[in-house]
Image (tube, rainbow, N blue to C red):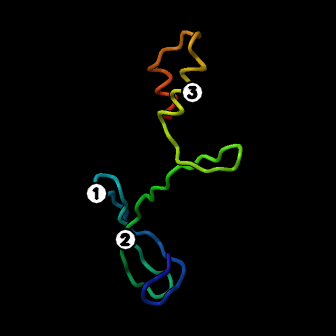
Amino acid sequence: MRCPSCHHTESRVLESRSTEAGKSVRRRRECLGCKHRFTTYERIEFVPITVIKRDGKRESFDRSKLLRGIIRACEKTGILQKRLEALVDE
């Protein structure tokens, strides 16, 4: 993490706390160059899953489309639908 005061690239974490119901992390840092203390917030960036088809076309991931295909493939196997849904959720 780059220091906002001297732009030194190394710092150490003094304290970490989960905020916003676990959706971000607040970190208190100290620059190893100038000893300036600063706070950073780290959030999870949502990147949508893109499926690349055989012909090279791209489309957004569709959970229901995947589930339909797996259900069709497992029709006569006796596997419960709840188990297949759990598989897709993973």
Looking at the picture, how far across and down is residue 84, in whole percent?
Answer: 50, 23
Instruction: Name above or below for residue 60 compared with residue 81.
Output: below
The residue singled out by tag 1 in the image is 20
Which of the two discs, 3 and 2, labels the residue nearer the N terminus? 2
Looking at the picture, how far across and down is residue 40, in whole percent?
Answer: 38, 71
**For the image shown, how many numbered marks are present on the structure?**
3
The disc at residue 28 is: 2
Q: Which residue lies at the image location 52% right of the left edge and 27% below the top edge?
A: 68
**Quadrant location of residue 73?**
top right
Q: Is residue 40 left or right of residue 52?
A: left
Looking at the picture, how far across and down is residue 12, in whole percent?
Answer: 47, 72
Q: Which residue lies at the image location 44% right of the left edge and 20% below the top edge?
A: 82
Q: Which residue lies at the image location 64% right of the left edge and 50% below the top edge?
A: 57
The residue singled out by tag 3 in the image is 69
Dot 1 crowding, Cα within 10 Å, few <14, some 14–19, many 20+: few
Q: Nearer the viewer, mark 2 or mark 1?
A: 1
The residue furthest right is 55
Amino acid carrying label 2: it is Arg
Amino acid carrying label 1: it is Glu
